[in-house]
Image (spheres, rainbow, N blue to C red):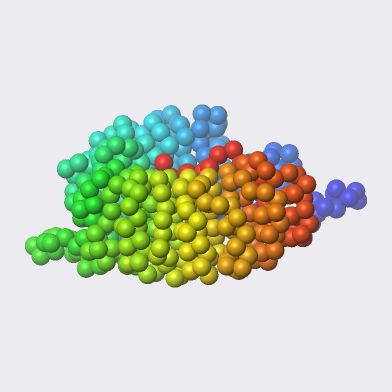
Amino acid sequence: MSPVAQRLHLPQELWMEIFTYLSPTEKANVRATFNYFKTLIDHPVLWKKSTIVLGNITPLNDDFWELLRNRKIHAIEVKKMKMKQWKKLTTSLPGLLNLTIDSCLTQEILTFLHPLTKLQKLHLKDCSGLLDRHILMEVVHYNQLTHLSLCNIKCFVGVPLTAVACLKNLFFLSLHAKYGFLNAVGVQSALFHLPKLRELSITVHLKNTQRLSECFILPEAVGSREGELSCLPKLQLQKLELIYFDHSGLTENALGQLSSLQTISLHNYKNDNMEFLNLMLKKLPNLTEVNLVGFSSLDLCCIPPRLEKFCAIRTRINNETLHQLFLCARNLKHLDLSFSYGFDVFCLTKLPVRCPRLAKLYLRGLNFPEETLIVLASMKSLRELDISNNKLLTPEAIFKFQSMTSNRTHQIVHRLQLESLCCC
């Protein structure tokens, strides 16, 4: 028996284990090349966590839908698809759990989705072609949803979001409007009627602290009338993302409702006054993760004691803030300063002593010399380092770092762009 034939006769369990490490494209290539593996590659176990992307080039014939059905595919992302194929999708995959629609969303398409009664995650990336009330009328059909993302919506002006408030199983909610602020009363109504909600992402577009705070303050009239939905006395959010934060803020009453937060993400804060940000970090004692993107200035004097992850991207930071961070965040495991500026890169040499548990360090777009890189090599806990777009480091310096760390640290040296934290 030839060596190739001997390898092909390995136990199926071993091949299954090997194939779990392949991407969907790689598995498809193996299936097309080796007829021997065709049945094995189609086993549902290998596709359990896969998302199938459908676009113009995908051959959506009956054999294709049967293949997805046999693989028990539960997650689909639609880039573009003809109307008749939407009917095929719902009839072929009635057990679909996760659906993302990128564009070309219409009222008719939303109606076609009604047979997907088990749907748990729904992400509509472009709602601009529909009226808000039409979206809400369709969303109410999926009371088993745990994740709902509505992007490029039209502010829900005058719509109380009662449909969203009926989705009692919601764990994650994302409401992103391209222009204008989401109706504060509507957001408030939804939040205080969703007992399982733990993660929230909304666009702000506001310069009014009071209006934003209304979203997170207990409504004055707590549903006492018969038939009204019961109102939660306290929010239990763990993650909050505020996009286009601009010049707004949150009152102490609102922060009191957010005391359970473990992760806060703020995008595009344009106010040089750091009083609100320091107050927020002080009033949210359970924070373990802070993400700040596009700040015009960052001057922190209050660092959460449990902080494990800190990201300041495209942000002006002073030396005092980094000194305070390294001094107080002794449990820091993840630090991202990509494309940030305003501080002396010499501060980075303090990391081995001040942050002994740091495992991931992202310094994309920062220029620092070989001497600093050699100091970072002494960090025994460091497992991933992003030094892409550094114009001062030579290949020899990078090789020296690899030798000093015995290749225990994965280095990222080339990246085309910064991934957006926003899901739109």
Image quadrant holding the C terminus, namely top left
Q: Quadrant of residue 335?
A: bottom right
**Residue 193 percent location from the top left of the image:** 23, 60
Answer whether residue 116 is visible to the viewer in this image: no
Q: Is residue 282 above or below residue 161?
A: below
Q: How many marks?
A: 0
**Residue 374 percent location from the top left of the image:** 71, 57
Residue 298 is left or right of residue 391, and the answer is: left
Residue 417 is left or right of residue 138, and the answer is: right
Which residue is at 85% across, 48% downward? Answer: 4
Residue 104 is left or right of residue 33, and the answer is: left
**Residue 124 percent location from the top left of the image:** 38, 41
Which residue is at 52% across, 51% downward? Answer: 343
Residue farthest to the right, as pictured = 1
Of 376 and 403, nearer the camera is 376
Of 16 and 388, nearer the camera is 388
Which residue is at 28% across, 49% downward? Answer: 248
Of 351 and 14, nearer the camera is 351
Answer whether residue 393 is visible to the viewer in this image: yes
Of 105 and 190, nearer the camera is 190
Which residue is at 16% across, 43% downward? Answer: 158
